[in-house]
Amino acid sequence: MQIADRMAEIRFSGIRKILEQVNLLEKQGRHIIRLEIGRPDFDTPQHIKDAAIQALNNGQVHYSSNYGISQLSEAICNKLETENRVTYAPQEVIVTAGANEAVFIAMMALLNPGDEVLIPDPCWVAYHPCATMAGATPVSVPLHFAKGFVPQVEDIAAQITPKTRMLVINTPQNPTGVVYGPETLQKLAQLAVEHNLYVLSDEIYERIIYDGARHVSIATFPGMRERTVIINGMSKIFSMTGWRLGYAAADRPLTDAMIRIHQNTMACATSFAQWGGVAALNGPQQPAEEMVAEFKRRRNFLYQALQEMPGVRPVHPSGAFYLFVNIEELGRSSEEVAMHLLEKAGVAVVPGSSFGRFGEGCLRISYANSYENLEIAVDRMSRALRELN
Ligand code: PLP
């Protein structure tokens, strides 16, 4: 039996090795503090669960419109208008099975085989495989520690060829937690307009943001609405990763194409989960705000603690729930250091190389774990790092 050729380009996630080792150690009875986690450690707020339970009990168990239930489409349009200052009609929004599906259908619908997609690297793990599945060529653009992992327009411009069709941006960013300021976004927007590029703008962490940083959607800059696909969802801010609820918003010709991929793969997002999504967007925001406040408290603690650790230089993050730390001074690969921390300290973190080749030399440390566990982790990590230094 032969597996499709494209699979040669689609590898297992780099985090797998760490997870396998975590499982092994946990089976042996070791206490592992899990800081490799990419999801909030909070429960979904009760009013959101209640809305989904009620929808189930009311018989909302059938297919919905491919676009999503009208109540959710309206809630998303309203949110985009009031929070992001971009106007979309309901058929310019597609409710998807998580933001991940939104990325996939955008790339499938907008890219031709051979098109090049510029992806600042290190980055979230699914952009490269989604581009590859669409037959396109993902092109990594390096993000530099020395530049605070903010994308440099010259670096992006240097990679543009006649085949470049799309630029991916993600702010607040996974894995670095860096938030792109309006000046950076404006330069990127200008570049996209000049070179007639689509921009896939992944804004899933937009509300997990600190220190008065403000999230701005690149779709608001001149000439950008018609070329931007906004990707967002409920997973992170409402702690709903298992619900699989996200969305894409874009100009009508783009959603007209994307909906045909969605229609023939997912058909629709889960019907009763969508009712939870309505409650999430239209209901009380206090639980989300409390979660962000707690993330901020943990970030402050962890950033400070990491600054004092030997051989480790953290980048100050203004968003998401990750710290990206440079470990080059330790003179080992990110995988070696991650394995050392796991085995010696019982702390799981992700090697930077899992997020692309320019993530090497760094580790991603998530603070989606309790403050108490972070305190223990810091203590254990300091000791284990001293052994390496
Ligand atoms: N985009 C980014 C930047 C992410 O970090 C993640 C999940 O980790 C996703 C998208 C996927 O979100 P969802 O769970 O809604 O598919």
Image (tube, rainbow, N blue to C red):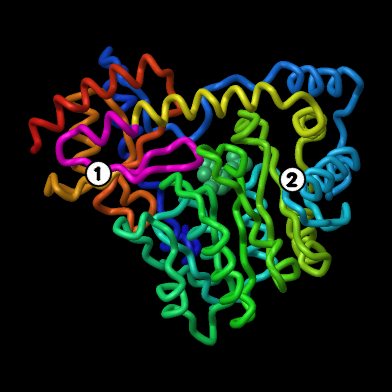
The label shown at residue 313 is 1
* Residue 377 located left or right of residue 289: left
Seen at 15% across and 28% down, the residue is 384
Q: Position of residue 171 (x, y in %)?
A: 54, 52
Q: Which picture quadrant has residue 88?
A: bottom right
Vertical placement of 140 versus 333: above or below?
Answer: below
Residue of label 2: 83
| Kind of residue at badge 1 | Arg
Seen at 81% across and 31% down, the residue is 282
Chain part drawn in magenta = 303-324
Q: Is 82 covered by the magenta stretch?
A: no
Q: Which picture quadrant has residue 111?
A: bottom right
Which residue ends up furthest to the bottom in the rendered image? 162
Quadrant (top left, top right, bottom left, bottom right) of the C terminus? top left
| Distance from the alpha carbon under mark 1 to that under mark 2 | 34 Å
SS of the residue at dot 1?
Answer: strand
* Residue 182 located left or right of residue 26: right
How many residues crowd around disc 1 within 10 Å: few (fewer than 14), some, or many (20 or more)? some
Q: Position of residue 11 (x, y in %)?
A: 41, 54
Q: Which picture quadrant has residue 350?
A: top left
How many residues crowd around disc 2 within 10 Å: few (fewer than 14), some, or many (20 or more)? few
Vertical placement of 225 versus 82: above or below?
Answer: below
Name the foreground residue: 336 vs 366.
366
Name the foreground residue: 84 vs 55.
84
